[in-house]
Amino acid sequence: MAKTDFVSGDGSGDAGDVPLASGRLGRQQAVSRLLVLEGRGELDAAHVRLVASSAGVSVKTVRRWLEAGREGRTGPVQRDRFRITDELHGRLVAWCGNAAGVYRDLVAEAERARAEGRQVPDVPSLATLHRAIRLDLSPGQRAALAGGERARRRHDVHLRRPRQWRNACWEGDHKHVPVEVLLDGKLVFPWVTWFIDCATGAVPGAAITPHQPSRDAILAALRIALSRDEDPTGPYGPIGGLPSLVRIDRGADFLSATVADALGHFAVPVQDLPAYRPDLKGSIENLNRCAERMRFASLPRYTHAPSMRLRPGGRGKPVDEAAPLPFAEFVRLLLEWITWWNTEHTSQALDGRTPLEAWRADPTPIEDVDRELLHRYTLADDGRSRTLTASGVRFNNRYYVGEWMHGEEVRQITFRDRTTARAVRYEIFTALGLQGDAPAHPSEFDRLLKDALATKPRTLVVDEAQWLNSEAFEYFRYLWDDYATELALIFVGGPGCYRVLRREPMLSSRVFIWQGFKPLTRAEVLETIPLFHPVWEKASSKDIGYADEHAAHGNFRNWAWLTAQVLRGLKRLGREQVDRDVIRWTFSHLGSNGSVGEEE
């Protein structure tokens, strides 16, 4: 057991049995005080006896201390021994803690000096050097010689923060997963961005990416953490809500303006910790360490596993040749582990409870975020409006989808001739699929439609809008202007539609986007038509241009008619590929007005 100058007691025994100061420190204090009293001429035998009684030594020993103090020594006599100087410490650093290498250098230098006729002191033995290193260097200093700063920090002493309540503080971090997974035929190292509740050790949210994470991963993890799901079978369950503080390290992505706004608008402060201080966010660092030991180490292609080769080769190479996991399978396994961590893993710090049990046992109220606002709030905004299509939201040549995007209905209404507001009501009633008979009174009809349009977001596509009159347009505007309806209107029409809409100032002033459709150019035709239908994939560009010039004229509807007739021509002529003869046969079966002619 290591020696120590500090003695602690449990308070059960006599207070006099427990020294209030270490022996060396008590002697220095006593001698300094006695010398001051002696200098003022106030020292007497009572002072000496009092010090001897408090220090637990004899009066003769105190007088001997006082005699040494007059000579300038307030502590015990230091034994003369070999010590580690700053110069030797520098040599040990250069040799990465190899005492034998330092010893060989000292011996070689001494031999060269004696060969030159110079007098040098004897070199201590290797055992003496080892003993001096143990006595003069702390465990942290010795670890730093071989392992560097990271190894030294393992011997640092840190205070432990008092345990608080749930959502009092979260900690967030990125974790590089040392497991190779397969994504699109390539081996990648995934990353996980997650948060942990410091009081309960529960993980409220995480985002897994096949690349080094940035703002998108942090926002996704934050959105998951802020929302809560009462379903206990999910990976996070009821864990989440608004924290009082979020503690992170000094990362450029964490400190970006987007993330600061995402938390700042909720009045949640972010504590910026200094770099390379994992001890200041011990909860998330412990989660990273546990995840690697409990989950990542058991996966195939784990790159930090001990190697069975005598010469393992380069760093970072896998130690086995097992088939890598697909990225989707890795995500599934990690989410299962997070579920296990929250619901089954017990901890002594939680009195043998799981994080979920500790979370539910905490009576602290939880402040939730409106889920309807959360899905848009944590999205990065580049200042541009995005259109929600059937494929999602397009950004940087990719489509992004979310659960909140599902459920929006798109209904199409077509008018073939001049219509009235009453006809518009019946068309909307039919398009929405409302049950029962349509009300006879206009006010009741309007109330029914507005109540139906207020239940969820809907999009009405009004085709052949050039046939609508002012009364019909005014009724659509009346429904759209109602604050309760969640309605989007798309007016689609042929020639004259733009002029008809422009004649209605109350409606045209509310149009967000005017989209005109022009015929495809020749370059667009040559690029698009081979992708439109497989029949045009092997057709030459000259034949496609010939068909567009004489029949399609850059109109996609004409190309659809032409393609249908070309398929008939291939079947009729027994051809497998479109050529000029097939196109001419197709022209002969198209009417003068562009319609398909009758079969022969």
Image (cartoon, rainbow, N blue to C red):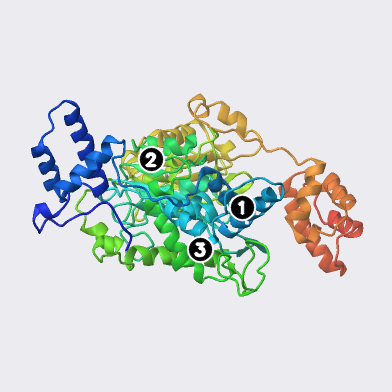
Specify the amino acid type for callout 3.
Val
Specify the amino acid type for callout 2.
Thr
Asked whether disc 3 touches disc 1, contact meaning CB atoms under 8 Å apart, the reply is: no
Q: Earlier in the sequence, mark 1 or mark 2?
A: 1
Q: Earlier in the sequence, mark 2 or mark 3?
A: 3
Determine if residue 595 is in view: no
| Residue that carries the numbered disc 2 in the rendered image | 485
Q: Is residue 431 above or below residue 599?
A: above
| Residue that carries the numbered disc 1 in the rendered image | 106
| Residue that carries the numbered disc 3 in the rendered image | 331
Asked whether disc 2 touches disc 3, contact meaning CB atoms under 8 Å apart, the reply is: no
Query: Where is the N terminus found, in terms of image quarters?
Result: bottom left
What crowding class fits label 2: few (fewer than 14 Cα within 10 Å), some (14-19), or many (20 or more)?
A: some
Asked whether disc 1 touches disc 2, contact meaning CB atoms under 8 Å apart, the reply is: no
Specify the amino acid type for callout 1.
Leu
What crowding class fits label 1: few (fewer than 14 Cα within 10 Å), some (14-19), or many (20 or more)?
A: some
Residue 587 placement (x, y as % from top left)? 85, 53
- Give the residue drawn at x 66%, y 45%: 118
Query: Where is the C terminus found, in terms of image quarters?
Result: bottom right
Residue 4 placement (x, y as % from top left)? 29, 55
The disc label shown at residue 90, or none = none
Q: Give the quadrant of residue 581.
A: bottom right
Whole-angstrom CA distance, mark 1 to mark 2, is 89 Å
Determine if residue 522 is in view: yes
Whole-angstrom CA distance, mark 2 to mark 3, is 40 Å
- Give the residue drawn at x 27%, y 60%: 349
What crowding class fits label 3: few (fewer than 14 Cα within 10 Å), some (14-19), or many (20 or more)?
A: some
Q: Give the quadrant of residue 561.
A: bottom right
- Give the residue drawn at x 87%, y 51%: 541
Whole-angstrom CA distance, mark 3 to mark 1, is 56 Å
Helix or strand or loop: what does disc 2 sit on? loop
